[in-house]
Image (tube, rainbow, N blue to C red):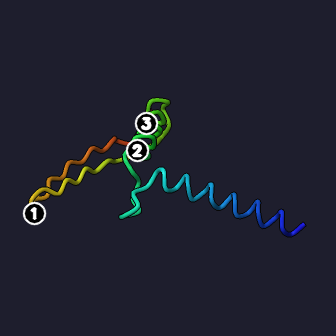
Amino acid sequence: MSGSQTDFSERKNSEARLLYDASHDKLTGLSNRAHLLDNLHKAIQRVREGENYAFAVLFWIWMSSRISMTAWVTPPATSF
């Protein structure tokens, strides 16, 4: 009985690791582009649905010792 529980646990851990690796950069551990876009789409959808939800996106591009930063912030929803 314990052998089958161990096998299931190892498989579950492997699947979780594969999902993490598919959505994160191996070097930095940060979300990759696909994961970022998925989260961005979800955040935009929440705002469109009228939820009291705000979010910000910061683009940070490092080019030849110059930093170019752009921020986009959604204002919080207001109700009257």
| 27, 66: nearer the viewer | 27
Distance from disc 2 to disc 3, alpha carbons, whole Å, reads: 13 Å
Q: Amino acid at mark 2?
A: Ala
- Looking at the rendered image, the disc whose residue lies closer to the viewer, 2 or 3, is 3
Question: Under tag 2, what secondary structure?
Answer: loop
Question: Under tag 1, what secondary structure?
Answer: loop
Q: Amino acid at mark 3?
A: His
> In the figure, 46 relative to 8: above or below?
above
| Label drawn at residue 2 | none
- The 10 Å Cα crowd at callout 1, few under 14, some 14 to 19, many 20 or more, is few
Quadrant location, the C terminus: top left
Q: Amino acid at mark 1?
A: Ser
Residue 63 pos. (x, y %) = 12, 56
Name the residue: 62% across, 59% down: 14
Residue 69 pos. (x, y %) = 18, 52
Name the image quarter holding residue 16: bottom right
Quadrant location, the N terminus: bottom right
N-term-proximal mark, 2 vs 3: 3
| Residue, far bottom | 2
Name the image quarter holding residue 64: bottom left
| Residue, far right | 1
- Residue on which disc 1 sits: 65
- Residue on which disc 2 sits: 54
Name the image quarter holding residue 73: top left
| 19, 40: nearer the viewer | 19
- Looking at the rendered image, the disc whose residue lies closer to the viewer, 2 or 1, is 1
Mark 2 vs 1: CB contact within 8 A: no
- Residue on which disc 3 sits: 41
